[in-house]
Each structure stands twice: as C-alpha cells, then as structure tokens.
Amino acid sequence: MTSGAARHVAATVTAAEAGQRLDVWLASRLPELSRSRVKVLIDGGHVEVDGTARKASHRLKPGEQVMALVPPPPSDEMAAEAIPLRVIFEDAHVLVVDKPVGMVTHPGAGRTTGTLAAAALAHAPGISGVGGPRRPGIVHRLDKGTSGLIVLAKTRAAYDSLTAQLGRRTVSRRYLCLAHGVVRRDEGVINAAIARDPRSRVRMAVARPGTGRRAVTRYRVLERFAGFTYLECQLETGRTHQIRVHLASIGHPLVGDTTYGGRKGRDGLPPELIEGLGGVALHAGGLAFLHPATGEPVELTCPLPNRIATIVSHLRDK
C-alpha cells in the first residue's frame, strides 16, 4: 500500500556539480530519501538524464537535465498475504518457521510484497502491532538468500522478552553452511568487527581497527571435501551478513555467495547444483531460547534443505 501521490523532480546540473555520480547527486537533491531508495529509483528507470535512463554510476555533465519520478512512500499499514508457511513451533506467544530461501523477512528497499512478515500477519493476525508496523512480530531476520529457523513474537510481552534475550546474547543460533576451500582448523573463533563496506552500499566488511560493531562467529568443521568444507557456525553476535563476511575474510566464502567472493561454476560443481541453491549455501539449522511466558528452554532444529544437501551428497560421492 502507498500513501500520497508521486512527485516529479527536475533540475539542471551546474558546472560545480559536473563529474558527480548520478546517485550521489540525486541523493543530495533528495535528502529525505535513503541512498538505497535513490538507487532503487535509478535502477527502476524512474530517473532520466536528458531523456535517457542512466546507471547510478553515470558521471554528470554540466547542463544535463535530470528528471526523477519519486513514487509515494509506502504506507505504514501492511497488507496480510496468504503465503504458506512451514511452521516448526507455535503457541499463543511465539511462532517459529522455516523460512524458505528467496523470501525476504520484512519489506525493504526493492521488496514490498511476498515477505515473511506479510505471510505471518495472514497466519496470525494478532501479531499486528507487535513490533514495528512494517515488521509485525519480527524479532530478528534472515537474509533473502538464507533459509532456516526464525522466531516471531505473537504478543508484546513475548516481543519484549525475545528482544531482551537477543540483547543479552542468550539466544542460540546455529547455522550449517558450505564454504569454498578446505578449512584446516577443526574449530575456531572469528572475532572481527563489521561495518558497512565504504566501496559498496549493499556489502558489509571487516572494519578497520577501532571502528565497526563487535562481531564474533564460532565455527566447527563437520566434513571436508576436495575444495570445500561443510561447517557449523554459532553466532555470538548478530550483525548483517556476519557469517558470510567472516568466512570470506579468512578466505572461505560461502558457495553461491557472489557478493562476498563465492564463485560460480569453479572447483568442479555442476551448474545445475549452483542454480538449485537459489541463494547462499547457508541454513539456520538450530535455534534455542527461553520461552517468554514459561521461562522454559525451547530448542528447535531444522534439517539441511535439499538445495544444500544435494551439493554435500555430490561432494561425498566424488
């Protein structure tokens, strides 16, 4: 849903502005929009330079006419969508589902429908108003390209309890993943702060010393193959893309993760197995927390999905 009306923005590039990237220039003209929203407008063909759609990296010339059509901002009201969910655990307080790869957790830049939040709202309408209006019930998130266990709160009290547990780092999240290369150590800890990559708005990166947010990932090798390693990772913190960034930083990007250096088609994997991944070879296979109403431990597991299991099986048979 949207509110208000679309507006047109037109301006002429001055001599002082010449040489600026289109996205940088437009962001300065539209300070109320985030850089990611500006990029969505450009990528969506809503911005023209002298009547022609250009890339975000286009370098502007003096005298060029830039015209942008800015759609109205999304309404705070979210529409429920009857999308089937694989429910792993549910009671009056919490809902735990196995999120499929390709599904976005909540609306964001470039994706407003087909989200887990909208599906959960249809499944349990009572979560409306729990948490943010665009993130009903959402306590934590999983990347679009990651599958597995995610917990949602069905009441305000449950939301407060679960977010507090996350803040205290007492929620246990265990991930299964397949990485490029052979990890030599049987287990280890990657303790490296993470920050936004200054070279890319869609990437995170290990931060320079003294900057970024603390990030700790514990890993354990489950199985080694020729050119690959099957691992279990435990999050001590929960930063954006944490496992992907940390493993790539030690030279072992995840299979299917082209954002952080995962390679397609190299090392002998059949193309159909990579295409069947639908995302990154990363699955949230274990989740443990204290029940927000009873205080009793809740421990849940979710087996490796076929999209990753078929690759592991292929490597075992080689």
Image (cartoon, rainbow, N blue to C red):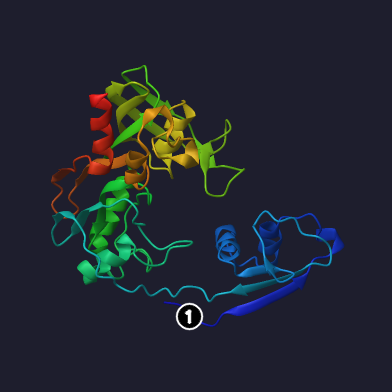
> What number of labels is visible?
1
Quarter containing the N terminus: bottom left
Taking the spot 17% from the left edge, 50% from the top edge, the residue there is 291
Query: Residue 318 in the image: x percent, y percent?
Result: 27, 23
Quadrant of the rendered image containing residue 287:
top left
- Compared to residue 160, the image places residue 270 above or below, namely above
Instruction: Indicate left or right for 191 with 289 as reference.
Output: right
Residue 14 vs residue 54, the one in the foreground: 54
Query: Residue 86 in the image: x percent, y percent?
Result: 19, 56
Give the residue pinned by disc 1.
3
Q: Amino acid at mark 1?
A: Ser
- Compared to residue 183, the image places residue 97 above or below, namely below
Taking the spot 23% from the left edge, 42% from the top edge, the residue there is 306
Taking the spot 43% from the left edge, 36% from the top edge, the residue there is 215
Residue 192 vs residue 230, the one in the foreground: 230
Query: Residue 120 in the image: x percent, y percent?
Result: 25, 64
Instruction: Indicate left or right for 137 with 288 as reference.
Output: right
Task: Confirm whether residue 169 shows in the render.
Answer: no
At label 1, counting other C-alpha atoms closer than 10 Å, the crowd grade (few under 14, some 14-19, many 20 or more) is few
**Label 1 secondary element:** loop
Q: Residue furthest right?
A: 15
Taking the spot 13% from the left edge, 59% from the top edge, the residue there is 91
- Compared to residue 52, the image places residue 265 above or below, namely above
Task: Confirm whether residue 72 shows in the render.
Answer: yes
